[in-house]
Amino acid sequence: MKPDIDTPSEGLLRADPRLAQLRMVLLGPEIEALSRLEDPAQFAAAVGRVLPSAVAHASGDGQLGLALAPALEKATQSSIRSNPRTLVNILYPLIVPAISKSIGETIDKTFQSLNESLKHSLTWRGLRWRLEAWRSGQSFAAVVLKHTLVYQVEHVFLIHRHTGLLMSHVAAENAESQDPQIVSAMLVAIQDFVRDSFHGAEQQGLDALRLGELRLWSEAGPFATLVAVIRGNPPEDLHEVLTITLSRIHSEYNLLLETFDGDSTGLEGVEADLTTCVAQRQQAPLQARTGFPWLVALTVLVVLLLVAAWGIHWWLGERRWDDYVARLQAQPGIVIIETGQHDGKYLIEGLRDPLAADPEALLRAAGLVPGQVAFRWVPYEGLDAPIVLKRLVASLAPPAGVTLTINGNRIVANGSASSAWLDRARLAAETMPAGAPVFDLSAVTNADAARDAHWADYVGLLRDQPGIVITEAGQRDGRFVISGLRDPLAANPLNMLSEAGLNPLLVTSHWAPYESLDPTIVLKRLQKSLDPPASVALMVEGDTIAAIGSAPSLWLERARMVARLLPSGAPRLDLSQVRNVTDPELVKLSDTIQATVIRFDYNQPLPAAGQDETLDQLASELNRLASLAATWHFTIQVMVTGHADASGTGAFNLSLSLARAEAVIALLNKHGVDPEMLGLRGAGALEPLENKGAPETARSGDRRVSFTIEMQAQS
């Protein structure tokens, strides 16, 4: 532009400052923007501001996804290879619930099959189904499920998971329900209630509900929930059908489900998938209407009964045989070597001591027939303690004063025996075979030496007893003999034999009864005959039996009579120290009863009105009087005397008075009064009361029953 500027000789043009100024004027903003690309921080900030808008704009036609897919795949593969734990942490919240649900459904399916099989395994239908399984080649569980799992899917709802809006609904032809929108809203409300009410259920929901024969199964997906209303007993396999249908709907309509806002446009094909679910049903197989095979059933029943009877008979026979062998093995002196069967019979071989139990007797006791069992016994000498004991008893014949018992592995002899028997027993003990029980004779005493001393002690003891007089004591034919006189109240000589150490079987006693005059015996006799009251004590004072205390006069009278009857030479009964006392209650009761009068109306044999209380009181007093009389050993006799006034004839009045006395006795008997204590007497009009009042009043007083008491000491 300026010719005066020379061109450099080396061929390079020098920069013109004016060009730089012109460049800045024309391209200044652009140059400044391009300079930012050279600064990484400024470049990243600029890209970050425009990148979201660019990605959003480019994702509309899908080209951005196609462009980024290879890079993202390589980046993901590289991240997984370098740190696989990251992918595991991402997939764990999704895979674990899915696996748990799948395992749970499998277990439920298994238990459902097992429960139905067990429920019908022993029923008549179960037998028919087993026959059907055998003919068709199917398993018994499959046949049971085919007959028992009868169901029909009546409604299927597809509900948006985030908005709760109904997306589609299909119902079976014969199904009845409310408005699908209302039902859908209620199901969503129930799910929300469960999530809000229970801790830990925020991300979960109800899988199943049951109301009577209706069941509600729910399968949840990322954007939609499939709900099926089922009538009957569905199999667990239906869960898999619902899951597959929901997965197919999400695969085909993923974008529409994600962006669903209430408009079902584009989701028309969902009904075809839901119709597939509604078509799920299973009806009970039709049974052929044939008559019941009674002949076959009867034949099978008879065969089963015969087989059962034979089996029971065989089992009982084997059990009896086993019990018999076990009992035989437990017997001392028997050793069983072999058991079995030969020629249709049971066979037992072994060793048997001649003193052992009889196997055939045990055979009959076990309920077996002797002809069914064959024995092969070899005799031997058993060393069991019971067998050795039997052998010793048979060979030694121990006397009555010796007993042989088993104590562990010893046979112990107790008691006393003669010298000759002891010598034989010691020889048997020394010749016992090796392995046999020990024969212990240490507790046996020599009876010949100690018996005479015991006999002398026994005779001396008897001589000291009051009421016993010995006239003879000695030995005759190897036995002790004693005779004499014995008062029945004296000590019993037989009881004293054991105290003296003598065997009662070795003593012969002859005692003649007599009445001893020994003071001790006389005291016993007086105690028994007089039965003194508790206030009287009888005791021996030298040759006198003294009575000390206090007693009523009746007992004293009886005691004086007994004292006068004592035989000559007997101790004297001294009653001087007994005070004569009378029981005040006894006297008072006697006076009260004798003052009691039962009134009667004119010509009436029964007591007048108002006499019931008097009769009750009289019965109580009579019973108390009888009790006191028994205490003091009195005999009470109450004379019941009937009276009549003088208005009638003598014979009539006597009969009426007797009737009145009988009526009172009958009433007293009803009140528990002993009838043996009551006497009957009729006085007629012969014993009137002394009454100076009006004639009618006097006659009224004579119509009565009176009482008189007599007491006597018991003899």
Image: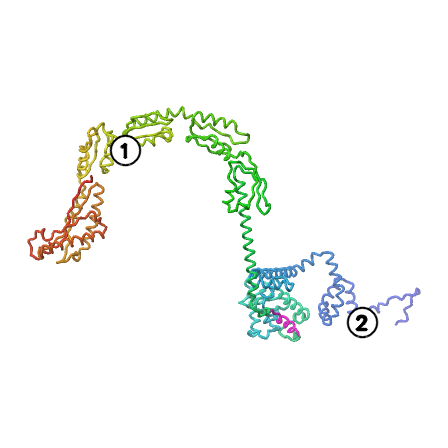
Q: Which of the two residues, 347 or 591, is positioned nearer the viewer here?
A: 347
Region in magenta? 269-282
Task: Residue 612: give its label.
Answer: none
Residue under label 2: 26
Labels 2 & 1 near each other (Cβ < 8 A): no
Horizontal side, residue 688 vs residue 481: left or right? left
- What is the magenta segment's predominant secondary structure? helix
- Three-letter residue code for mark 1: Leu
| Circle 2 crowding by C-alpha within 10 Å: few under 14, some 14–19, many from 20 | few
Q: Where in the figure is residue 603, as x and y percent of width and height?
A: 13, 58
| Circle nearer the N terminus (2, 1) | 2
Residue nearer the viewer, 167 or 285: 285
Residue 125, by quadrant, is bottom right
- 270 versus 549 height, above or below: below
Q: What residue type is labelled 2?
A: Leu
Residue at image position (72%, 72%) is: 60
Q: In which quarter of the image is the N terminus?
A: bottom right
> Is any atom of residue 299 visible in this view?
yes
